Image (cartoon, coloured by chain):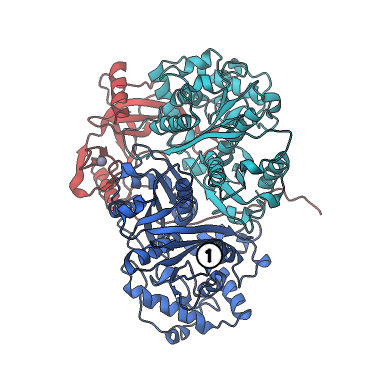
Chain colours: A blue, B red, C cyan
Amino acid sequence: MRDVAIVAFAQSPLVRRQTDFDEPQMIMPVVREAYEQSGLDRSQIDFVCSGSADYLAGQPFAFIRGLDAVGAWPPLSESHVEMDGAWALYEAWMMLQIGHADTALVYGFGKASAGNMREVLTVELDPYYLAPTGIDCISTAGLQARALLDNSDYTERDMAEVAARSRRSAMSNDHAQVKKDVTAEEILAEPYWVDPLRPSDCPPITDGAAAVVLVAGDRARDLCERPAWIRGIDNRIETHYFGTRDLSKSPSTEVAGKTVGSGDGIEVAEISSTFSHQELILKDALGLQDSTEINPSGGPLAANPLMAVGLIRIGEAFNQIKNNGKQRVLAHATSGHCLQQNLVCVLEGD
Amino acid sequence: MSDDVKVLNSVVSLDYERPPTRAARRYTEAVGEKRLIAHRCPECERLYTPPKGYCPVCVVLTTDEHEIEVSPEGVLVSYTVTNPDKLHQQGGKTSARGDVMLDGTRITLMGELDGVEAADVHTGMRMRAVWVELEDGRLPSSGGWGAVGIKGWEPTGEPDASREEVQELLKKAGES
Amino acid sequence: MPGLLREAATRALADAELEWSDIDAVVFGKAPDLFEGVMRPELFLNDAMGGAGKPMFRMHTAGSVGAHTAIFGAHLIESGQYECVLSIAFEKQSETDTSRILGGGSRGGAGVAFASSIRQYIEKSGAPPHIGPLVAVKDRLNALKNPHAQLKIPGIDIKMVEESEMVVEPLRKLECCPTSDGAGAIIFTSEKRIPKTERPPAWLHGSSTRSEASGHPSRSWVNPLAGQQCAAEAYAQAGITNPLEELDCAEIYVPFSWFEPMWLENLGFAEEGQGWKMVDDDITAFDGAFPVNASGGVLSANAIGAAGLIRCAEAAMQVRGTAGEHQVPDVRRAMGHAFGGASQYFAIWIVGSEKP
Ligand SMILES: [Zn+2]
């Protein structure tokens, strides 16, 4: 495996509704900041890969405008995944692995505010058997939370603790959207929204973008004082149908985690637990110890820009190495309802 | 089984709301006054209309201070005659659409060609914008491939640009 | 949708004499999700693709996505991390009204945008008007030899094309691709896992992807720089200096007849402004010196998301000698090509019968 490191990470303000800027305008400052941080200019980037979803914008080919934001002139060696930017990072990492590139820019973006996400994400379900039921993403998460509570020792208090801690952690994250000095008791006092989920168990709706620069080999050390080396990255998908899954577990996360060594000495984990109960499921699937700090950024419960949120987890994990002196950290991204697909990545400092 | 199921009709209807950017709002206001505005990139001086609020070549944001007025007239550099009925679409009449390169710019804007029979359309014609009428200060929703705020193009009646002049324009547009 | 994918994947597995359990990872591609009205349909189609428990990737690079899907599958093998990968792509345009999604009602759809660049090509190159119909006839005659082609028009000739109705000037109906349902699947293995079948593998000699922004005023739709650079990189990887001499045939994404001469120039098979002469001289005909789209090409079936992957697969079939009735004799190296967006996304691969 070729040594590849993250040397730069930038993110936009993560907000409920970005009214000033359209997508290219939202991405552009982020990309510029990532270039500047890396010390590379556009002409020194060998490969560009992005993640986004047409259905967030409600337009076919919505991702094409992303090209406007990265300076795709002269033309770029480039690709796009209809997934979170974390998978774009995987593709870019692969280009560096095979030596077709030595540097890469990865970005992810989404303006969830344009549509009604509870309706839009229903269209992500099987169009023959599930979508016609009209079930929305909060309700499918509710099914999963119920399955967890009924099949484990976890309680609603455990969920509330996750929700409260995430909002408190977000207070020290300049980019976070929902930050609040809140306790589990206060959250437990909220009425149910979609039983057993309370409003605070659920993520906000967020507009935002993020970008990461990858560099192969020793050059990473020249460009970044403490680069974060990608020691393992894997992703796995499960069957789509809720009826054939044990929703209280995440076997795809477990397999991906084992492949990259997730249980072993992780100091900080930035995970895409979009709902509070998912942190409990993911922590077990990844085999994280109690000593592992989870989502010091606040995680998706503090800001959830779809198609960028997973890449932001990787970026936040990188920041833990770069800025906080951590040595071994983990990032996780997810796709689909109820953690259907999961990507796990382990980063290490020098 | 009585009748075989041949089609499951499932209509997906989703509403989206995309607020216009500042550049788009100012462009719309200008169109209301029958003016065409563009942004000039501070780095490469390329012109963009409608203004995007950025230059995709230089990766810089542009704002009001980069706004300039451009001519709503130009030369027809390419065209096509469409027959929408044959594309299984709504509407119906045969129409011509063309690319007009605005005077003094390398910008081509596409639009329907008005005031000229489809059979008489030819490259090199000098054209001017036919403005969309605002409805309550707003542009009617357009969608599709044309320029916002411009319904199309009509001949100015001035003499045509020669074939050489059109090729020169296209060549200039293809540079850099 | 699941059935389409299942059928393609099952046939690919049978061709390779492999089982579902041999597949380590799945790369899936399709063009806009709005075409089928399902957001990220790979999530539900995953079961039909045998993806459960495996790594899965979803590509979307507009019309070029099928070729991207093939190329990324090959990259996974090249990295040494995977031994056997399924790249699979589809489009089921009959699920919705795609020209409405693309064109937004009565404004004419994708053909209008492309017809305009075709007009520019004709003006610039001085190509005579029969070139487009000539391509249309050639590809449709080739399609008669391809059991998978959708449009089969026995006895098609120039006159029939020239008498078909004008859809988007200068394109007549028979010069346009159909709307299609379809899927394609390719299986990649590492060298040590090449299945022992009677059918030899195709070897990847080079691949490249290039994209350019649509939003700046000075780009060319007729001879896009991204396409030129994409070809140049693929040739460099394959050690090719004279593509017309060193390649034996090509499968090029030609959704409208005139794109053949345009892309012959863009890909370096002809000098700028000269591509139409290759068509006129029958060089790209099935029995010509450099057959283009022996399968009948996109003009004979355009399941958009799958079409690029099928171009790549057809190139591979030619070098494997498994193209059946539309097999070009003695193909050693062939190109698969796709483009997308406003002629701004390009993906190319070059495959050969010999290990590079
Ligand atoms: Zn500029």
Q: Between residue C14 and residue C214, name the one nearer to us.
A: C14
**Which residue in the rendered view is the most extreme toward the top?**
C281
Where residue C92 sits, quadrant-wise, is top right
- C321 shown above or below A214: above
Residue B162 is situated, as x and y percent measured from the top left of the image, at: 29, 17
Answer with left or right where residue A206 lies relative to residue A193.
left
Q: Quadrant of the C terminus of chain A?
A: bottom left
Secondary element under disc 1, as helix, strand or loop, is loop
Residue A12 location (% of width, % of height):
33, 59
Residue C186 visible in this rendered orientation of the protein: no
Q: Which image quarter has ligand 1?
A: top left
Q: Chain of mark 1?
A: A
> Badge 1: few (under 14), some or many (20 or more) residues near its Cα, within 10 Å?
many
Residue C30's spot in the image, x, y percent?
55, 45
Residue, x 66% and y 59% (percent of image)?
A129
Residue A212 position (above or below residue C177): below
Left or right? Give the position of C7 relative to A18.
right
Residue identified by numbered label 1: A261
In the rendered view, tell whether residue B68 sits above or below residue C286: below
Between C235 and C43, the one lying in front of the other is C235
Amino acid type shown at disc 1: Gly
Q: How many marks?
A: 1
- Answer yes or no: is residue B1 visible: yes
Q: Is mark 1 within 8 Å of ligand 1?
A: no
Nearer to us in this view, C225 or B155: C225
x, y percentage for residue C182?
Answer: 64, 40
